Image: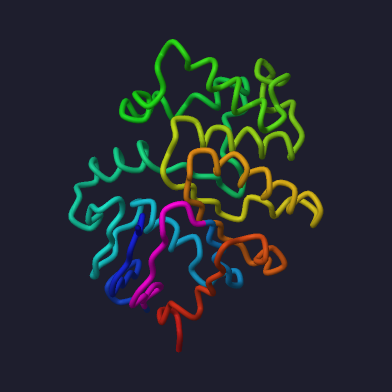
């Protein structure tokens, strides 16, 4: 079963500019681990922002969890994203003056629907479980500003996964790591996602990672936009 499907999607930042995205067909099945690759500037982040409902295509159909995102209001898209999507940013986007635990629980405050997936009485147990899996349980009270890059990366993953989102979007989160640590990080991400059958769309320019995934897709092959 497809968790998301795009048909005849076109997007440009203004009507007079060249189309950044022109995608005839793209879909992901629930539970898949998909690697989307392409060089810098080819539209990967724009593509993720369309998937997340941050950007709305000018034409086409985008179905996510059997709902057409293009028909939603901005508020509905915000609620959908907060409830069902975990986002791992390249720069992690952690709040430096908050502790590890305070950063991790932020999605639950942004989405009542996501918070309902976790009983209030076991919320701390869920945080403990995810942190244990990611090897950061001893860091929960520390400010994230005191952590290494690798530790911050794991905090970002914990935040994205808390509340059982159906889809994880990862925008080049391993760019600051060496090859060995990149592969270890991805395997760890997969281990945690496997328990909830969470779908992963991982975007990177580093094609050496592609063999770790169920499926690899070149954005250039599915996207007619940006071509001269």
Magenta-colored stretch includes residue 221: no
Percent position of residue 200, x then y: 51, 52
Residue name at image x 33 percent, y 77 percent: 24
In the image, residue 124 above or below residue 184:
above
Main secondary structure along the magenta-highlighted residues: strand
**Depth order, front residue of 40/151:** 151
Residue name at image x 38 percent, y 70 percent: 26
Relative to residue 101, is residue 50 drawn left or right? left
Percent position of residue 207, x then y: 67, 69
Magenta-colored stretch includes residue 26: yes
Q: Residue furthest bottom?
A: 228
In the image, residue 117 above or below residue 192:
above
Q: Quadrant of residue 213?
A: bottom right
Relative to residue 162, is residue 150 drawn left or right? right
In the image, residue 201 above or below residue 164:
below
Q: Quadrant of residue 35?
A: bottom right
Percent position of residue 81, x then y: 35, 43
Image quarter of the N terminus: bottom left
Image quarter of the C terminus: bottom left
Percent position of residue 19, x then y: 36, 76
**Depth order, front residue of 168/21:** 168
Residue name at image x 28 percent, y 62 percent: 62
- The magenta region covers 19-32
Q: How many marks?
A: 0
Q: Residue furthest top?
A: 121
């Amino acid at each position: 079963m497809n968790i998301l499907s795009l048909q005849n999607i076109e997007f440009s930042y203004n009507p007079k500019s060249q189309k950044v995205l022109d995608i005839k067909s793209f879909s992901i099945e629930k539970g898949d681990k998909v690697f989307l690759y392409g060089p810098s500037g080819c539209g990967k982040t724009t593509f993720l922002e369309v998937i997340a409902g941050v950007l709305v295509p000018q034409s086409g159909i985008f179905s996510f969890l059997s709902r057409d995102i293009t028909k939603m209001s901005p508020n509905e898209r915000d609620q959908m994203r907060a409830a069902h999507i975990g986002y791992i940013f390249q720069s992690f986007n952690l709040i430096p003056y908050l502790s590890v635990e305070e950063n991790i629980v932020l999605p639950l405050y942004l989405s009542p629907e996501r918070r309902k997936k976790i009983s209030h009485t076991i919320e701390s147990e869920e945080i403990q479980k995810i942190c244990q899996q990611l090897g950061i349980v001893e860091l929960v009270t520390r400010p994230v500003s005191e952590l290494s890059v690798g530790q911050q990366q794991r905090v970002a993953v914990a935040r994205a996964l808390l509340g059982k989102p159906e889809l994880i979007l990862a925008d080049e989160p391993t760019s600051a790591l060496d090859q060995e640590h990149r592969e270890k990080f991805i395997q760890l991400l997969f281990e945690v996602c496997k328990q909830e059958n969470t779908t992963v769309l991982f975007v990177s320019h580093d094609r050496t990672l592609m063999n770790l995934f169920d499926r690899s897709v070149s954005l250039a092959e599915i996207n007619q936009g940006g071509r001269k």
